[in-house]
Image (cartoon, rainbow, N blue to C red):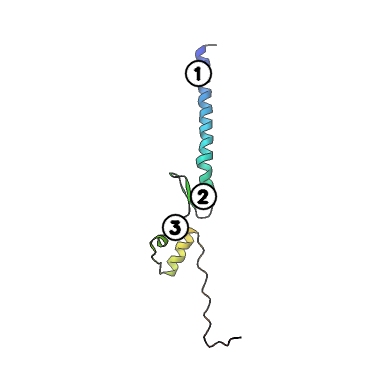
Amino acid sequence: MNPNIERLKLIFICLFVAAAIGVGVWQVWWVMPAQKCEKELKKWWDPVERVCATPVLISDITGRVITDEKALAEAKRAIGRPAAPAKAPATPASAPKE
């Protein structure tokens, strides 16, 4: 056979092997961690830093309190935090003690 055909055949085989290895590395190092992070409840994947992060309420950072109960419950639900438990009814001061 022509030596040029043999050389081209080897070049194409090497390119194919390199591309297959590249796709495998891409899957293991980028795609699989992103899918794992997205399966977790309310986590965010940062592709630049390759970090699985938990969202934080801006009120937690600034210390400002969300005064509207409906808005607070919606914000906590959006980031996956459970809503605060309902307050127990206050017992009257004149209740007999046992």
Residue under the point 44% across and 57% down: 56
- Answer left or right for 97 relative to 64: right
Residue that mark 2 sits on: 38
Q: Are marks 1 and 3 in contact (CB under 8 Å)?
A: no
Of the image marks 1 and 3, the number of the one nearer the N terminus: 1
Quarter holding the C terminus is bottom right
- Nearer the observer, disc 1 or disc 3? 3
Q: How many marks?
A: 3
Alpha carbons under labels 1 and 3: distance apart: 55 Å
Quarter holding the N terminus is top right
Residue that mark 3 sits on: 56
Alpha carbons under labels 2 and 3: distance apart: 16 Å
Q: Amino acid at mark 2?
A: Glu
Residue that mark 1 sits on: 8
Residue under the point 47% across and 59% down: 78
Query: x, y percentage for residue 26?
Result: 50, 37
Of the image marks 2 and 1, the number of the one nearer the N terminus: 1
Above/below status of 71 relative to 24? below
Quick one: SS at disc 1?
helix
Query: x, y percentage for residue 96?
Result: 58, 88
Q: Are marks 2 and 1 in contact (CB under 8 Å)?
A: no
Q: Residues within 10 Å of mark 2 (few under 14, many from 20)?
A: some
Quick one: SS at disc 3?
loop
Q: Amino acid at mark 3?
A: Val
